[in-house]
Image (cartoon, rainbow, N blue to C red):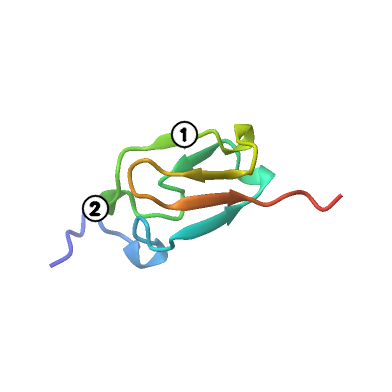
Amino acid sequence: MVNPDTAHHQDQYETANAQPEITVTQKDLPLHCPTPKMALWASHPRVFLPIDETPDGRFQCPYCGTQFILKKDDA
């Protein structure tokens, strides 16, 4: 049974590591995992990921293994 005090609107959130790869943009920085779209009750502690400091624009979350890919600006 769902706890009504902590699980309001949980159908609007993803579970942690629901997607093995997530593409992010500059507007998502500073990047952290879990992301705001993930349900916190089923997740790991928040960790900030310095994806903008990597040479290839990729960073893997050390907790859940989700691979984040920084989309380059179309300039």
Of mark 2 and mark 1, the one earlier in the sequence is 2
Mark 1 = which residue? 48
Q: Position of residue 64 (x, y in %)?
A: 34, 49
What amino acid is at disc 2? Thr
| Circle 2 or circle 1, nearest the eye | 1
| Front position in the image: 42 or 11 | 42
Q: Position of residue 22 (x, y in %)?
A: 52, 57
Q: Position of residue 2 (x, y in %)?
A: 17, 64
User: Are there few (<14), some (14-19), or many (20+) residues within 10 Å of tag 2?
Assistant: few
Mark 2 = which residue? 6
What amino acid is at disc 1? Phe
- Residue situated furthest left in the rendering: 1
State the residue at coordinates (68%, 52%).
Answer: 71
Image-based side of 71 in relation to 6, left or right: right
State the residue at coordinates (62%, 32%).
Answer: 53
| Front position in the image: 7 or 25 | 25
- Residue situated furthest right in the rendering: 75
State the residue at coordinates (26%, 53%).
Answer: 42
| Label 2 residue SS | loop
Image-based side of 28 in relation to 65, left or right: right
Image-based side of 69 in relation to 44, left or right: right
Occupied quadrant, residue 30: top right
Image-based side of 32 in relation to 3, left or right: right
Counting the numbered discs, the total is: 2
